[in-house]
Image: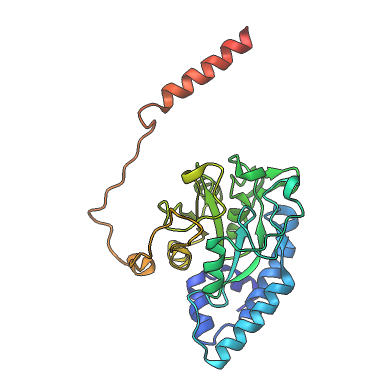
Amino acid sequence: MSQTDLCWLPATEMAAAIRARQLSPVELVDALIDRIHQLNPMLNAYCTLVEDAARHAAHAAEAAVLRGDDLGLLHGVPVSIKDLLFTRGVRTMRGSRIYEQFVPDQDAPAVAKLNASGAILLGKTTTPEFGWKGATDSLVTGVSRNPWNLARSCGGSSGGAAAAVAAGMGPLAVGTDGAGSIRIPASFCGIVGLKPSRGRVAVYPPSAVGFLSHAGPITRTVRDAALMLQAMAGPDERDLGSLPVDATEYLLACEQAVRGLRVAWSPDLGFAIVVCLQFFTGLEANRLA
């Protein structure tokens, strides 16, 4: 299998092949780092790359497979983390010059759980300052691009995460979502993004928008999102709103039929069109005045 083919494997296949000793985590990490070096100068999806640490972790993961150790759900599978989430010992800029040199001394809950599952951190992905808009650019990291068309936005605020996954620069990415920050870039980049129910994935530090902001998976396939959510879900004592472990096997649930399920959709939530019209009418009135 070529390096390019390796980069496009679903995470479910990566994890299974690593367990079966058919795929080396070292080979996989090397292939992805090479692709990041090739494409990231154009896309600006990663703002921090931890090559040495990733390669060291890949060698340790390979050794664990060869020893026959018990392996976590994502053992040897590479992942990226949105640069709003704390990563112990790895710079977390939050898209702001204020935090440009900030290095946390602890992992966010989702990061800690992914580490415990055996995932390998490739780096941090770009975000607008503090994740406060639906496009991804900031004074500290510049503009992130859509891999389908460099003239287009990759959305936001988890735009770097979505661009990285869509471009084959990693199979799994952690995003955060308060008002669409996972769902917008996932739709712009043609991939899968899930904002889990509040508390399903513990969040720390607390978001400035309180309970609105959730951490969730960004992937290329639904089954990869289910696998990643399985690893990320669960309580953390730092998040008093986090939920107990759910007995649901998310990956297994993907095999169930959807017949009988209902989807609710509203174009205005009963008020949004009126609010928007009032807002823009006010702007026009001010402009004319």
User: Which residue is nearer to you in this view: 12 or 203?
Assistant: 203
Whether 15 is drawn above or below 211: the answer is below
User: Which residue is nearer to you in this view: 191 or 52?
Assistant: 52
Q: Quadrant of residue 226?
A: bottom left
Residue drawn at (61%, 88%) of the image? 63
Residue 60 screen position, x and y as percent: 64, 83
Residue drawn at (70%, 73%) of the image? 53
Whether 126 is drawn above or below 18: the answer is above
Residue 240 screen position, x and y as percent: 45, 54
Whether 159 is drawn above or below 9: the answer is above
Q: Quadrant of residue 166?
A: bottom right
Residue drawn at (69%, 77%) of the image? 55
| Quarter occupied by the C terminus | top right
Horizontal side of residue 188 vs 52, given as left or right: left
Residue 41 screen position, x and y as percent: 75, 56
Residue 57 screen position, x and y as percent: 65, 78
